[in-house]
Image (cartoon, rainbow, N blue to C red):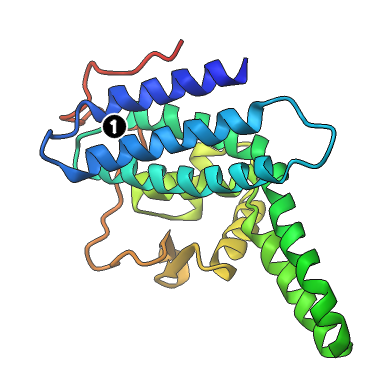
Amino acid sequence: MPSQKYTELTSAVYKILDFFPEEEPLKNKAKEKALAILENLVLVSLPDNPHPNTQKNRAASQALKDIEVLESYLSLGRKREWVDGMNLMILLKEYGQIKKEIEPIAKLVILETEQAKEPVKTKLEKPVDNNVDKVVEKSELLLLSERQNKILEILKIQTKAQVADFKKVLPEVTKRTLRRDLDVLLKIGKVERIGEWNQIFYQLSGVDSSVANPKPIAGQSGQNNAGEGRTLLMS
């Protein structure tokens, strides 16, 4: 059952958070966010009603937002060496799969919002058509592909990376495709490009490039003070 899977994943998050310092405010915030995600995912997994279920669509949309926030909390814990890199990669992979599953449901909220605005916009004729095109384009960009989400997950751990670094983690993807994905992420403001020529790096938007030092992706380095011997086994 999906609800059992979500419960086990939430339990795994709690185990990870046990390594956060007790006095750290982020610890309780992350737990609350994990519970909110669980509640919305259980609602999404309920059997379909005969009529369109707006509540389920909104729950999926909120779950996507909350997962992004929780991933940021956990990544911050990794940078402070409270979280084992391998454990974090396992959780990010599981949440990435869930996001892929519920994105089509969450997308219905965007469509409902656009449809609700249509009667007001149709009176403006051509100018409205242009605005609608921009809204649709933006909403499509918000729903990232699994590969693009993977790129963001890598940058949350490694801070900044080159195309060759992404290629090592995604060997089945061509460099041309990776550059195209990075261009999309640049366009919607998810990442920034720094450097020039053969020293071009990518990093998450808002990161101070003067202090952002590349970190090894989980599994590529054996120097991890916080997580040696604590690899999480998810059943």
**50 or 79, nearer to the observer:** 50
Q: Where is residue 14 in the image (x, y as percent from the top left)?
A: 31, 25
**196 or 142, nearer to the observer:** 142
Question: Which residue in the structure is indicated by mark 1?
Answer: 221
Q: Residue at x 59, y 39 (%)?
A: 99
How many numbered badges does the structure rendering display? 1
Q: Residue at x 46, y 71 (%)?
A: 197
Q: Position of residue 115 (x, y in %)?
A: 80, 65
- Does 67 appear above or below 142? above
Q: Quadrant of the N terminus?
A: top right
- Does 31 appear above or below 233? below
Q: Is residue 213 left or right of residue 176?
A: left
Q: In this view, does 83 lie to the left or right of 173?
A: left
Question: Which residue in the rendered view is the most extreme toward the top?
Answer: 235
Q: In this view, does 213 lie to the left or right of 154?
A: left
Q: Which residue is drawn at 60% across and 32% down?
A: 43
- Does 12 appear above or below 152? above
Asked where in the image residue 119 lies, by quadrant, the reply is: bottom right
What type is the residue that disc 1 sits on?
Ser
Q: Where is residue 186 in the image (x, y as percent from the top left)?
A: 54, 67
> Could you classify mark 1 by the number of other residues whose Cα lies within 10 Å: few (under 14), some (14-19), or many (20 or more)?
few
Q: Confirm whether residue 216 shows in the render.
A: no
Q: In this view, does 83 lie to the left or right of 23?
A: right
Q: Confirm whether residue 133 shows in the render.
A: yes
Question: Which residue in the rendered view is the most extreme toward the left?
Answer: 23
In terms of secondary structure, where does tag 1 sit? loop
Asked where in the image residue 22 lies, by quadrant, the reply is: top left
Q: Where is residue 158 in the image (x, y as percent from the top left)?
A: 35, 47
**102 or 207, nearer to the observer:** 102
